Image (cartoon, rainbow, N blue to C red):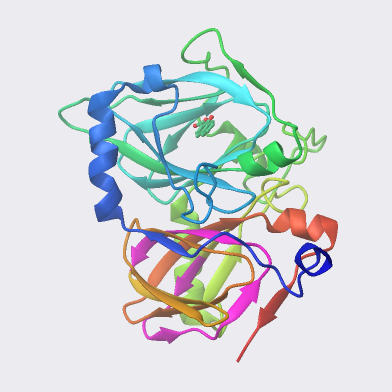
Amino acid sequence: MLHSLVPPAPNTPCQPALWKYADVHPYLMQSGQLITAEEAVRRVLILENPGLRGQSAITQSLYAGLQVILPGEVAPSHRHTQSALRFVVEGHGAYTAVDGERTPMKPGDFIITPSWTWHDHGHAGRVEADAPVVWLDGLDIPMLRFFDAGFAESGGAASQTVTRAEGLSYQRYGANMLPVRYDAPFGQTSPIFSYPYERTREALHALETRADIDAWDGAKLRYVNPATGGSPMPTMATFMQRLPAGFEGKPYRQTDGAVFSVVEGSGSVTITRNEQVQTFEFGPRDHFVIPSWHTAQLRSAQGCVLFSFSDRPVHQALGIHREERLS
Ligand code: 1HN
């Protein structure tokens, strides 16, 4: 058994995969006719890795899905020890509430639901004027399943009572300042629960023209917990990167398999493992996964913006993270 128990390099069953938005969008809209958000609790199209059938997993440690909410709907309040991230893909008028505070969901916003916090989602929009809102959910479900550490509870009311003004946590924790007696309201998780796209986009576009572009990543930033400088959640790291027009990235590989959501523009990713080479062409709202220790090479003729997340903080905490930047 020895060689399969300790292989010379990671030998994941997770496969490279691409979900074109044009292919999944009809299913999302159809699901809106089949079941309400309230009845489903969470109405989600799971992005299941083709190499991990039946496991509701996009990598061995992570879950991903596309959630849809229609004008007037409520996804009722509940809480669980699994941490969640939301990355808004399209639509306007929805909000998510965490621990008594609501935040609007706008395309490109990165929003956190910390472990064991009450959360519900809603869409205040009018049916005629506002379209469905769709976002990418990223959760550490398979990781908590592996550790047998998951708990969940349903809330009493569908929508939790709002106890704080909208935007208060951003004012308190998101202005490069912290309260003098910092209370870590969500433990190891960031006290900022919404990172608006506006700010991220502005930073990346300025970096693109005014700083050196990394030959592997383009202009890539990681989101931080401002109180620690670490990842926004203890189990998941999140990133946003801008590939300038004409970018031909160098190949790299890393132990953390990563899930991508295409925000703007188009490009391609070539993913190689042993003799298997796959190239995916991507455009806005497409999603793809680069499995652990697969070599990836990003290109963009037009320029693009990519959001991504992975379980890197766990690799780093355990001292097992590896990355190779190839030429
Ligand atoms: C969940 O609680 C959410 O809170 C989304 O929006 C997706 C997938 C499986 C289990 C719980 C949410 C989920 C989920």
Q: Is residue 245 magenta?
A: yes
Horizontal and vertical percent for residue 223?
A: 61, 56
Q: Residue 201 sits in which quadrant?
A: bottom left
Q: Give above or below for 65 relative to 308.
A: above
Name the residue rendered at 26%, 46% in the picture.
Answer: 25
Q: Is residue 155 magenta?
A: no
Name the residue rendered at 33%, 70% in the picture.
Answer: 266
Image mark count: 0
- Left or right: 151 with respect to 275? right
Q: Is residue 230 visible?
A: no
- Which residue appears farthest toward the left when viewing the image? 128
State which region is magenta: 241-265
Q: Could you tell me what secondary structure mostly forms the magenta stretch? A: strand
Q: Is residue 47 visible?
A: yes
Horizontal and vertical percent for residue 11?
A: 66, 67
Q: Give above or below for 318 relative to 153.
A: below
In the rendered image, the quadrant that contains the N terminus is: bottom right
- Left or right: 136 with respect to 321? left
Horizontal and vertical percent for residue 316?
A: 79, 60
Q: Nearer the viewer, residue 287 or 71?
A: 287
Q: Give above or below for 150 relative to 3.
A: above
Q: Residue 263 sits in which quadrant?
A: bottom left
Name the residue rendered at 55%, 85% in the picture.
Answer: 215
Q: Nearer the viewer, residue 19 or 73?
A: 19
Horizontal and vertical percent for residue 73?
A: 33, 21
In the rendered image, the quadrant that contains the C terminus is: bottom right
